[in-house]
Structure formats: C-alpha cells, structure tokens
Amino acid sequence: SSPFYAYRWDEPEAVNFQQMLDNMPEITNPEPLGRHVNCKYTDSRGWTWTGLYNGVQLDRPGHKPYLFSVKDGMLNDMVHSVVEDDFHDIWAGTSYGICHFFIKDNKDVSRVESYYDRDNVPNESFVNRRAIKLNDGTIVMQSLDHIVTFNPHHFHTDSMSRMVLYPK
C-alpha cells in the first residue's frame, strides 16, 4: 500500500490541514519572490532550495548553484513547494507529483526519486509554498484539489532486503 494519502476538500482532515498550512509564517508574512520563482526554502544545513519554472535550484555555501530537472529524475520541472523531513532529505511538490531528494552524509544529493498517480499522489499541480512538516514527521502538501499527507518514516522497510531473486 502507498504511504501517500490524498484527502478531498470535503473531508474534515483536509480542512484541519489547510488551517495548518494557512498559519505557516511564510504564508502569513510572505516575502516577495522574483519572477519565475514559486517558492524558496532554507533547510537545516543552510542550503537554499528555490522552486522555479524549470526545476529546483540548490545553493550551498562554497559550491556553484545546481539546477535539478527532469534529467536528474524529476517527473516535472515546475516546482511549487519544498520541505525537509526528519532524515534531512528534501521533498518537492511539482506540477505532476512529488520528488524526493536523498541527501548522502549531509554533503550531496545522491539521487532523486519521483512519486505520481500510481503511488496515490494526485495527478495535479501542487500549490506554491504549501508544504509543512508536522511534529510527528508527517509531511503535508496542498495540491489543487487535495491535501496530500505522508510520513517518510513509513518509506523505510526491511522487506526488500529479504527478497530472494532467482535469475534464469
């Protein structure tokens, strides 16, 4: 089963999550963003992730900026929201799903993994700046017609390590 859950607007949980998103400081006191910038997020390492029309740009002190796009594993280049999980990995809501940026040893992005409608992520655009991590580690993101929740702790299982393959 998918760790993603999509709430419709007529569900009470969606209303509660929307109120949480409405009370985020960057929503109540939005900083002006430049043209073609959908969101900006600074993680716990001090890295800045800028959601753009053509990908997400990572700015790290002492490094050249890098633009992640479909060539790096994203399903869509239009990035609307960015948030950090308890493992210090980054999650981005795009115009076609959710992308997970795995950070290796707090130094580099090791890979990008994308989730879409087959993973129970609505096949619709996410909304600019509408992502938050709750105290229990659950991430809440708003798309056009749904509130999507998931907990990255539920992505880590041991079941795959026990799988035995029998090649021909």
Image: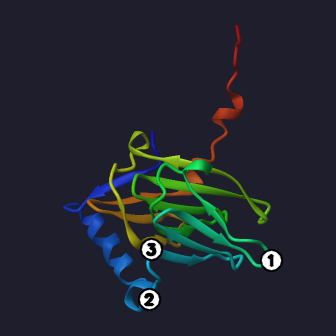
**Of the residues tagged 2 and 3, which is closer to the observer?**
3
- The residues tagged by marks 3 and 1 sit, at their Cα atoms, a distance apart of 25 Å
State which tag comes first along the sequence, 3 or 1.
Answer: 3
Locate the N terminus and report the quarter of the image it occupies.
Answer: top left
Which amino acid does the dot numbered 1 rest on?
Gly
SS state under label 2: loop
Q: Which residue reaches farthest bottom? A: 29
Is disc 2 in contact with disc 3, using a CB cutoff of under 8 Å? no
Q: Position of residue 8 (x, y in %)?
A: 25, 57
Looking at the image, residue 30 sits to the left or right of residue 145; the answer is right
Is disc 1 in contact with disc 2, using a CB cutoff of under 8 Å? no
Q: Label 3 belongs to which residue?
A: 36
State which tag comes first along the sequence, 1 or 2.
Answer: 2
Locate the C terminus and report the quarter of the image it occupies.
Answer: top right
Asked whether 10 or 42 is in front, the reply is: 42
Using the rendered view, name the quadrant where residue 91 is placed. bottom right
Q: Label 2 belongs to which residue?
A: 32
Q: Label 1 belongs to which residue?
A: 62
Residue occupying the point 43% across, 50% down: 4
Residue occupying the point 34% across, 50% down: 122
SS state under label 3: loop
- The residues tagged by marks 1 and 2 sit, at their Cα atoms, a distance apart of 26 Å
Which amino acid does the dot numbered 3 rest on?
His
In the rendered image, the vertical position of residue 149 relative to residue 18, given as above or below: above
Instruction: Tell me the tag on residue 100.
Output: none
